[in-house]
Image (tube, rainbow, N blue to C red):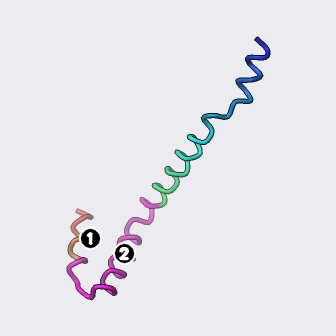
Amino acid sequence: MREMLKSFIQEEDGLGTVEIVVIIAVLLGIALIFRQKIFDFVTSSLNTVFGNDKLDDSFTNLDQ
């Protein structure tokens, strides 16, 4: 019984999964907090590259 408890405590198989879930949760939280800033940055970058204002309309409709 003691050996089984000792091996259970030393086992780290599920640790990688928990780390990935925490990292994804943090990234989603940051993305939600800075959502409007991200949309503004992407819109201005795409307008610089393509030089049209059609992208502004498509991103403003997402907020509704």
User: What quarter of the picture does the N terminus occupy?
Assistant: top right
Residue 34 picture location, percent across and down: 44, 66
The residue positioned 40% from the left and 70% from the top of the image is 38
Secondary structure at badge 1 equals helix
Q: Looking at the image, which residue is at 36% across and 75% down?
A: 42
Q: Above or below — where is 55 with respect to 9?
A: below
Q: Residue furthest top?
A: 1
Magenta highlight: main SS: helix
Residue 4 in the magenta stretch? The answer is: no
Provide the residue span drawn in magenta.
Answer: 31-56
State which quarter of the image contains the C terminus: bottom left
Q: Position of residue 57 (x, y in %)?
A: 20, 75
Any mark on residue 42, and which? 2
Three-letter amino acid code at the position of disc 2: Val
Counting from the top left corner in percent of width and height, residue 31 is at 44, 61
Q: Quadrant of residue 59?
A: bottom left
Describe residue 21's horizontal placement relative to residue 54 as left or right: right
Residue at image x 41%, y 72%? 37
Q: Quick one: SS at disc 2?
A: helix
User: Dot 1 corresponds to which residue?
Assistant: 59
The residue nearer to you, when weighing 25 against 9, is 9
Looking at the rendered structure, the kind of residue marked 1 is Phe
Please name whichever residue, 55 or 61, is drawn nearer the observer in this view of the structure: 55
